[in-house]
Image (spheres, grey):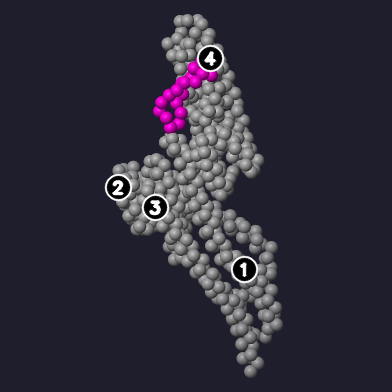
Amino acid sequence: MPTFRYQSTGSSASATIDAPDRASAVRELVRRGVTPTKVEIDAGNSGFSGNSGFTGYQGNPGRTIGARSASNGQALRTAGTVAGHIADEAVTGGALDMAASAAGLIARGTMSRAEMAAFIRELATAVQAGLPLVQALRTIAKQGRSDRQRAMLGRIIEEVEHGKSLGDAMAAQGRSFSELTVNLVRAGEASGKLDEVLTQAADLLDRDVKLRRSVTAATLYPAILGVLIVVAVIVVVTFIVPKILKSIAGQVVSLPWPTRVVQGVAGFFADWWWLIIPAVLVGFLVTVRTFRKPGPRMWLDTNLLAVPILGRLLRDVAVARFTRTLGTLVSAGIPAVSALRVTKGTLGNKAMERVIDDVCDQVSAGRTIADPMEKSGYFPPMLVQIVNMGERSGRLDKLLNQAAGAFEDRTETSVKLFTTALPPLLVVMLACVVGFVVLSILLPLLELQEAVR
């Protein structure tokens, strides 16, 4: 039986295992809870001649198998037999990969942010408890998952059993796992601290979900109030105002301009009501498509940051996410430039993302992170000082994680301010609209009264 030499995640030392072929060796290692990063034939113990060589598994599905000529015919036959086993496994593995890819195109399993946070938390707990990775994934897949999610986890398990790293297996699932999650898992595997990094990733996702829920809950009441205001105005203008104006039609020579405006709006809604919903949908789609383009989106995001109350809320939310995510990535051992490029996607504002692009260029050129952030004016001075001190002291990850809590508290304050200020603003807007409608009714009545006198 051939002997295979392997290296595992988190260890630079190599060890050996006896197995009929490389695929069996990988499966046996995974069953033992070992994540192999390299598996190859041990030429010194496999019965091959000294000039027979194989290049085995290197942490990805690509397999290079070769056998150089040997003078001994028996060695050649043995090498041919083993190569045949490996080639058969490669063909079978390729067919399985193609089938998995096809299945992924038909139904790609997805998770919400909350489900993803729960999944990463469960995986971190299982790994910390000492369960082998594949066994942990199988256990999680059985616990209350949808069929699509179980199918996705099944593909991950299969790829890990075939020797892929967990990070690569997650990345192969397309948009199911974010770039942030994939990079954290890869960093955990490379450093040998997968359980710690998974816990950090779960904490980060939980905080992100909590922040999104707080912002959504805070804006729900103003949104409902705004919709009710629009509906109330439409009902008043369409059904009530025309009946009042009809009673004085022909009695006033010239209607005041507020009355003509309201009358025109009422006539439009009465004659073209069937066109309103399609027009709103088309307008919405055109607006979304327009602002997906880089130029309009940059203009919109830049101007949103300048809105008095809303701009502060958007900036505080972005800064809180940026600080927490960057601190988590740097503490996981990811290089600063790579961490910045991944963190950029969490800002949600193209104007602030452009600043991070400038920061990456500056860091690549050997400059500091803090200077471009300070010049932009989008990031608070406190964050700029923390980044500057962290760079100088070499404690950037610790300082960022400590500051993230303060910025998250600041975000909660901004959310409360926004939710406190917005309803009165909507009420004032409603009062103005209602006042204009009442004025459009009172003015012709007053003119009619003057005419009667």
Boundaries of the magenta span: 1-19
220 with respect to 410 (left or right):
right
In this rendering, position of residue 359 left or right of residue 43: left
Q: Secondary structure at mark 2?
A: helix
Distance Cα–Cα, label 2 vs label 3: 15 Å
Q: Which residue is mark 1?
A: 228
Which kind of residue does numbered mark 4 sit on? Met
Residue 402 is marked as 3
- Residue identifier under label 2: 393
Quick check: marks 1 and 2 in contact, CB under 8 Å?
no
Q: Position of residue 143 (x, y in %)?
A: 62, 42
- Point out residue 409 in the picture as x, y percentages from the top left corner: 44, 59
Q: Position of residue 19 (x, y in %)?
A: 53, 19
- Residue at (48%, 39%) from the top-left corner? 195
Give the mark nearer the N terminus: 4 vs 2: 4
Is mark 4 in CB contact (under 8 Å) with mark 2?
no
Q: CA distance from mark 3 to mark 4?
A: 55 Å
Quarter of the image with the C terminus is: bottom right
| Pointer 2 or 3: first along the chain | 2
Mark 3 or mark 1, which is nearer the start of the sequence?
A: 1
Side of 361 where 225 appears, left or right: right
Q: Is residue 403 above or below residue 365?
A: below
Residue name at image x 69 percent, y 69 percent: 270
Q: Residues within 10 Å of mark 4 (few under 14, many from 20)?
A: few
Between residue 91 and residue 231, name the one nearer to us: 91
The amino acid at mark 2 is Ser
Q: Tell me: 172 left or right of 252.
A: left
